[in-house]
Amino acid sequence: MARPPVFVQDPQPTHPDYPLPDVGDPVMRPFWDGAREGRLMQQRDVRTGAVVWPPKPLYWKGGGRLEWFEASGTGTVYTWVVGHEPFLPAFRHLLPHVMVVVELAEGPRIVGHMVHVTPDEMRFGMPVRVVFKRLTERVTLPVWEPDR
Amino acid sequence: MTDGLDRDLFRRIRDRVAVVGIGQLPFAKDIGRPISDTAVEAIQRALDDAGLEAEDVDGMSMLEMEKTHEVSIARRLGVRQLTWWDKISYGGGASSATLMHAAAAIASGLATTVVCHRARNRGAKTSRPWSQEKALVVDDKALHTPWGLIRPVDVIGMWAHRHMHEFGTKREHFGNVAIAARKHAQTNPAAMMRGRPLDMPTYLAGRVIGYPLTLYDCCLETDGALACVVTTVERARDLRQKPVLIHAVAQASGPNPVHLANYNNTKEMMTTAVFCAELLWRRSELQPKDMDCAQIYDAFTPLVVTGLEDYGFCRRGEGGPFTEGGRIEIGGELPVLTSGGGLSEAYVHGFNLLVEGVRQIRGTSVNQVPGCKATLVTGASGVATSAVVLRGE
């Protein structure tokens, strides 16, 4: 858990039509705020410790039941796909684009994309760790690299 | 709700409502008319088929994505007044649900005769919803689109790839689905892919769109308009066509749902269809073994493989081998997509699967299953979905 966050840059400036997330969304904001600071945030039940993903509003069932915490940032490849043309212009420079569902060490499955890997290096169950890709001043994406 | 009460409530719908008319326009890459116009003509054709007039209609049920407007359609048709109407969300998850909602409205007395329809123009490359994704992404889409997971082929590819890993499902199994659909399209004059047969070497050499899926795993993109007319079974007996009874219906979101990229709903990453099937068969006197054919939603070939499992035609993990030896082709044990489906007839959010289901029960399909008494029509799995069992009297 203890390695300092690694930030990466897209090789190209963020495309004007990039589908950027609404980082001000009241439910998702802690996730995006954390990513900007290099932390992968998840939500859990205060009492049971069960990880809740996708996150719920903190007023869920009257409030006081959920909290955000920093996850380990490690997991394994549960499944992946490799995007080829025709693809959205915002991602075209990344093709073939390896998109992934990571099973986090904490349990939930989270969508992401890979960096620092070629499609033929991908394996089911492969260990991965989070790195942070800065897209704009406000938006940083947690993405994944092989945990070699 | 207890099982008993659920079954009891459901008795008010089962076999009480019938599809009495179907209509469709020729499918096209570019139909050259707006859906506000094609929807009206498809409904008019369905009314003509039933022997009903617009004045008999008081209800309307349709899909919500790419809107057509109830009052405008009613006015153009000459409907006296609508007393009930409904728009159903989640694209391909919704086609069977139009019949479910109509049946519920009729069984409860809120409407007597309902027209269900789907009209959409998607043949043009620029018309595809995923290609229009841009700017600020809100709500559930923010869970996957910022990473580029946007095209449905990729979202479904995640399931397909995992299925291959977990159960040894092969690309040839997906190919069997594509080839069966294409074979059925060859005898269907309405099918977009008539005259373009497909064999396994061609399938396997298909251009990769989103590994592991290729061009032939993907449905067509089509302009189309189709409609059904639904009314009480008593009324249906006085009309022109053999009544097609709505035997069982279900709609299900599954737990912890996320639209499309629904990867946390169970430990096993089951699709929404599992939950829809459970409800459907619990409400149905007929069971999977009683289905003479099945129209399983086929935006992508793997959805048919998982659909065969989800709807109980085989066990989990056996959907791939189930497709072997012509079992899902005409003449096989369970023909699927008998009109060619979304893969080879037309992709109209599965409404063509419903219309084909009706034809199979009437005995008028171009690929008629001899003596077909019952058929299953499903919506898209992965999204909040629906399914219906149709049968003859």
Image (spheres, coloured by chain):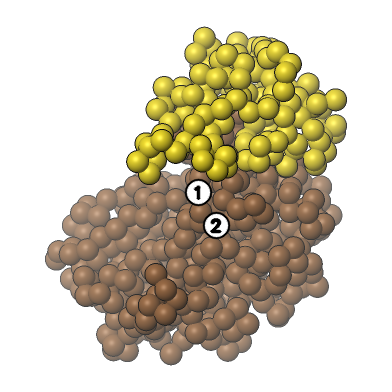
Which colour represents chain B?
A: brown
Q: Is residue B175 visible?
A: no
The percent position of residue B218, horizontal first and vertical second, equals 64, 50
> In what quadrant of the picture does the C terminus of chain B appear?
bottom left
Judged left or right of residue B254, residue B15 is: left
> In what quadrant of the picture does the N terminus of chain B appear?
bottom left
Examine the image and state in which quarter residue A88 appears.
Answer: top right
Height in image: B291 above or below A137? below
Which colour represents chain A?
A: yellow
Judge by depth and name the residue closer to the eye, B240 or B353: B353
Examine the image and state in which quarter residue A120 appears.
Answer: top right
To the question of a shared chain for discs 2 and 1, the answer is: yes
Q: Secondary structure at mark 2?
A: helix
Residue at coordinates 18% horizontally, 57% vertically from top-left? B75
Q: Give neighbour class at mark 1: few <14, some 14-19, many 20+ (Cα, 10 Å).
A: many
Judged left or right of residue B102, residue B143 is: right
Which residue in the structure is indicated by mark 2?
Answer: B272
The type of residue carrying mark 1 is Pro
Q: Are marks 2 and 1 in contact (CB under 8 Å)?
A: yes
The percent position of residue B160, horizontal first and vertical second, equals 70, 51
The percent position of residue B77, horizontal first and vertical second, equals 23, 62
Q: CA distance from mark 2 to mark 1?
A: 8 Å
Q: Is residue B88 visible?
A: yes
Residue at coordinates 51% horizontally, 41% vertically from top-left? A47
Which residue in the structure is indicated by mark 1?
Answer: B257
The type of residue carrying mark 2 is Thr
